[in-house]
């Protein structure tokens, strides 16, 4: 039995619900061979990417951004997979016959040359599969012929060295990204300005991010209060809250020239002060990061 026949049988085992064997006419299989299998690493403290070119098809990317789950993205060069369902499969390489493939996920695919993207546990399982010598694949029906199956496999050849470097990159990622840290609100009890332990942990993340991203130009710190008490007292309390946050960030190494601190009393409530719950939300200091390229 030839390799192509083995591939067809293996794919039909997994894709039986996608296309009945009696209707199938062909399998088009895309995969790098031993001589041209590459895994390319790029990364920094904000994002790590492990890229695998698939000849005549496109590229597969394992991507982990700071503060986000792992994801796998398959980017085609043109329209090869048609609309319908695509299957994410973990299977043994051709030289290890007799091992049944495992379906990791089934997801809808609109076609039109769009990317296939999976995240979280499925992407992690694909990496584990490669690390164990198996070959993950994305399979579905062909764009031009619904009786044809298209299978795009990731080769495990030359994967191990690149994966070791990828894991080192992952270990250096920041715990948060800009979108997660750009807007923060610290809440305060009635009549108080002391920082809670939870607020300090959040400010630690703000300081850590700012120290590693030179594109952050300013940090706006705005103190607020609820409407209980006099306007003068509320203004002073909002000032004290803003100053406490400012002092903590300065202590953590944030440059003073990046900080713009303001206080507003009860002039700008986030929600109505007509309820205790609303007043709880209005006793706050907001921390907003602004990058050089922010609009």
Image (spheres, rainbow, N blue to C red):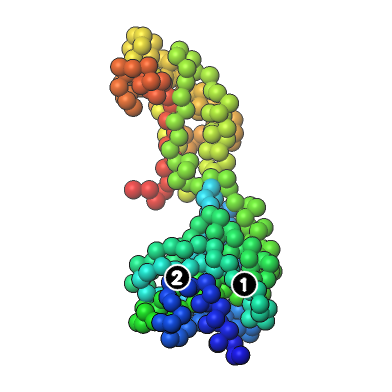
The reply to whether discs 2 and 1 touch (Cβ–Cβ < 8 Å) is: no
Say which quadrant the N terminus sits in: bottom right
171 or 89, nearer to the observer: 89
Q: Position of residue 169 (x, y in %)?
A: 63, 57
* Distance Cα–Cα, label 2 vs label 1: 16 Å
> Residue under circle 1?
100
- Residue at image point 67% right, 58% down: 168
Q: Is residue 273 above or below residue 143?
A: above
User: Number of labelled discs?
Assistant: 2
Q: Position of residue 84 (x, y in %)?
A: 37, 69
- Residue at image point 58% right, 67% down: 102
> Residue under circle 2?
17
Decide if residue 79 is on the left or right side of residue 74: left
Q: Quadrant of residue 137?
A: bottom right
Q: Residues within 10 Å of mark 1 (few under 14, many from 20)?
A: few
Q: Position of residue 117 (x, y in %)?
A: 46, 63
Q: Quadrant of residue 48?
A: bottom right
Identify the residue at the far front of this view. 22
Identify the residue at the far top of this view. 230
Residue 48 visible in the displayed image: no
Mark 2 or mark 1: name the one nearer the start of the chain: 2
Residue 200 visible in the displayed image: yes
Q: Secondary structure at mark 2?
A: loop
Q: Position of residue 253 (x, y in %)?
A: 59, 36
Q: Is residue 70 above or below residue 160?
A: above
- Residue at image point 52% right, 82% down: 8
2 or 235, nearer to the observer: 2
Q: Secondary structure at mark 1?
A: loop
- Residue at image point 55% right, 87% down: 4
Identify the residue at the far bottom of this view. 2
């Amino acid at each position: 039995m030839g390799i192509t026949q083995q591939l067809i049988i293996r794919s039909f085992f997994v894709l039986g619900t996608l296309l009945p064997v009696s209707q199938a006419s062909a399998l088009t299989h895309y995969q790098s061979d031993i001589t041209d299998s590459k895994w390319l690493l790029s990364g920094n403290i904000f994002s790590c990417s492990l890229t695998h070119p698939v000849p005549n098809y496109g590229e597969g990317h394992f991507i982990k951004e700071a503060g986000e789950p792992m994801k796998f993205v398959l980017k085609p060069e043109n329209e090869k997979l048609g609309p319908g369902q695509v299957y994410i499969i973990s299977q043994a390489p051709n030289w290890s016959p007799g091992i049944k493939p495992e379906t990791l996920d089934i997801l809808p695919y609109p076609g039109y040359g769009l990317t296939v993207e999976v995240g979280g546990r499925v992407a992690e399982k694909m990496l584990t599969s490669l690390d164990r010598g198996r070959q993950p694949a994305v399979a579905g029906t062909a764009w031009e012929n619904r009786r044809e199956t298209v299978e795009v496999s990731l080769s495990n050849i030359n994967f191990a060295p690149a994966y070791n470097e990828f894991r080192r990159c992952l270990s250096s990622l920041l715990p948060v990204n800009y979108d997660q840290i750009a807007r923060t609100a610290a809440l305060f009890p009635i009549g108080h300005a002391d920082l809670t332990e939870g607020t300090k942990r959040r400010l630690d993340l703000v300081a850590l991010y700012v120290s590693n991203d030179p594109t952050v130009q300013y940090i706006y710190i705005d103190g607020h209060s609820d409407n209980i008490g006099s306007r003068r007292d509320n203004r002073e309390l909002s000032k004290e809250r803003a100053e406490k946050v400012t002092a903590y960030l300065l202590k953590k190494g944030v440059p003073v020239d990046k900080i713009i601190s303001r206080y507003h009393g009860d002039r700008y409530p986030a929600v109505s002060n007509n309820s205790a719950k609303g007043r709880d939300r209005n006793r706050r200091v907001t921390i907003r990061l602004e990058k050089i390229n922010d609009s």
